[in-house]
Amino acid sequence: MTVTKKIKETCIKYPDAPALYVKDKEGKFESILRKDFYRKIETAGAGFLEIGLKRGEHIGIISDNRKEWIISDLAIMGLGAADVPRGSDSTAAEITFILNHADCRIVIAENSSLAVRILDNKQSLPLLEKLILFENNDVSLINEKKGNIEIIAFDDIMDLGRKNLEQDSEIFNRELDKGNKDDVATIIYTSGTTGTPKGVVLTHRNFLFQIDRVKDDYLLLKPYQRIMSILPIWHSFERTCEYIFLEVGGGIAYSKPIGAVLLADMAAINPHWMLAVPRLFEGVRAAVFRKVNTGKKASKILFKFFVKIGELYNNMTAMLIGTVPQFRKRCRVMDICLSIIPLMLLWPWKMLGSVLVYSKIKKLFGNSFVLAVSGGGALPPSSRNFFNAIGVGLNEGYGLTEAAPILAVCKHKRPVHGTVGPIFDDTEFKVLDKDLKPVPPGKQGVLYVKGDQIMKGYYKNQEETDKVLKDGWLNTGDIVIATVNREIKIVGREKETIVLIGGENIEPVPIEDKCLESEYIDQMVLLGQDQKFLAALIIPNFDLIQQKAADMGIPYAMDRDELLLSPEINGIIEKEIKQRISTKNGFKQFEVIFRFKLLPKAFEVGRELTPSMKVKRAVVNELYAKEIKELFK
């Protein structure tokens, strides 16, 4: 069994169910039925065979989300080859390194712009023979640079495939039947937050393990449901979830994480599910609060009151039904007794809030919405609490590329909020301290996992493989706390731990997440390695800052740098930080932020951020070395 073969079976089972929703030239969504979707996979596969694609070789795909990507992906894997994907936001140096390191003879590029980026470095790609373009929109520029590399339009691949199938209708399916679970499906190169990207080798067995568990035990997915896709398709979390939805009979609609675009697409598709990184949900929450804060004072008070009511109601409900994280065994009788009366008192207010407040926000998600799932990083509690308070289900999942990637996800009907859900039942795990000794539930340590979703290793990099994979056990590098029921709470990353000069160990993520609850703070990076105290680089919410400056009568010549030097603006940010990071809020004295620097430009994907919106801390330290040095003078 392979991923492509499993999806083929569903296409046969639900031939008239939509597989994809794609935009036409006018920007309107059209559906591709499963019977037509699989035919396109067959056709692409037959075309790839015609140009000489061989079983076991590696095919580069440098492209963003589009129907041709998933069609090519499933066709390549169906032929027993492996794809090597990357997005358009990757630098030319990254693309060249990956394609060369992965020994790619055939590469697919989304358009001529990316093709030129590849061809400019063809001298560093000695194996490259064929370059396939999804869009061939500037042939002359490509022809100038191609040399002896053959350029092929994807439409021509499909034409070749149709002719091939006319002569032999089973040419693709025969190759498909040769595949097995242990064939390499893909090599996904890590984002490189800690250095040179490493190629994670994943097999069909890794992906099939995820498909078989998530759809039945964790997310109650149904045929004909629609999912809104906004994460990069090559990202392991998005990719695995697409396989899961395609296998169960759902349809995928591609959108973008841009407010106006996403909202319009949500209205057009009326989705049941949505996957995104924490940053998107935090952005939506912040936008709602910004809009409320610009309204009347009474509306603002009413809104915040009902959001708090919703949060309290959810907390009491969790106690009543037994979904409170149990870092040590709780007394069920006590929880029921303590929660039932508050629930009765809160219920009328909760219903009133649903009519006056919650329903207006829920409309944005459509009337079919079931659940949103956040992955690719830690979800700030403020986002999780807000969405669940207003009745928009938001659960967390957890994993890493080396685990294909899902290790845990909150169960649909009984999510244990405050955790990323339980580790899969047939995945072994252990939490070890710094001396590699097991720690009990409720104690902090590094998570190790073992199971069928774990990678084979890093491609052509045994040294790095040996560092994280031993006897089948993968060192995730994540610092966690386990509950008595196998749920996991993520505390931070082992490599991101800040150690002050006094020896105090600090996990930056909880502090950053708490600060990001402020509507005035958009992005933040905590600093302090080998220093006496903590400091931070902060990107403020410029709309709010400028509005505040106008309200306070602060003169500035519409220059961000000038505005961010204002003592009044810095005072606002300082107050926001001190309100959240203090000993009375559970933080230790050495976790208090003593200094910060406001930056005039947001962090960008491909520069300071990975495609899943994680901060590249090493890159930040390098790019802002001067500012950091000033903070610790």
Image (spheres, rainbow, N blue to C red):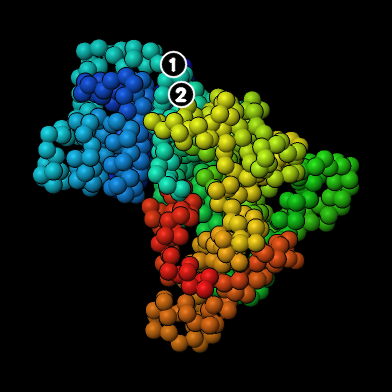
Q: Foreground residue, 340 or 30?
A: 340
Residue beneath disc 1: 180
Location of residue 432 in the rendering, given as x and y in whole percent from the top left corner: 67, 38
Please say if the residues under marks 1 and 2 sit with CB atoms less than 8 Å apart. yes
Q: Which amino acid does label 1 sit on?
A: Asn
Residue beneath disc 2: 204
Q: Residue at x 46, y 19 (%)?
A: 182
Task: Examine the rendering and report whether any part of residue 270 can be seen.
Answer: yes
Residue 563 lies, with reference to residue 185, above or below; the image says below
Quarter holding residue 214: top right
Location of residue 379 in the rendering, given as x and y in whole percent from the top left corner: 59, 51
Q: Residue at x 80, y 42 (%)?
A: 328
Q: Foreground residue, 498 or 265?
A: 498
Location of residue 88 in the rendering, given as x and y in whole percent from the top left corner: 32, 46
Q: What residue type is labelled 2?
A: His
Along the polypeptide, which appears first: circle 1 or circle 2? 1
Q: Which residue is drawn at 65% across and 61% down?
A: 502
Quarter holding residue 254: top left
Q: Which residue is drawn at 71% across and 62% down?
A: 588
Residue 523 lies, with reference to residue 321, above or below; the image says below
Which numbered marker is on residue 135?
Answer: none
Q: Foreground residue, 433 or 585?
A: 433
Task: Examine the rendering and report whether any part of residue 355 can be seen.
Answer: no
Residue 167 lies, with reference to residue 397, above or below; the image says above
Residue 350 lies, with reference to residue 556, above or below; the image says above
Drawn side of residue 272 relative to residue 436, left or right: left
Real-space CA distance between mark 1 and mark 2, rounded to the nearest whole angstrom:
8 Å
Quarter holding residue 77: top left
- Which secondary structure lies at badge 1? loop
Q: Residues within 10 Å of mark 2 (few under 14, many from 20)?
A: many
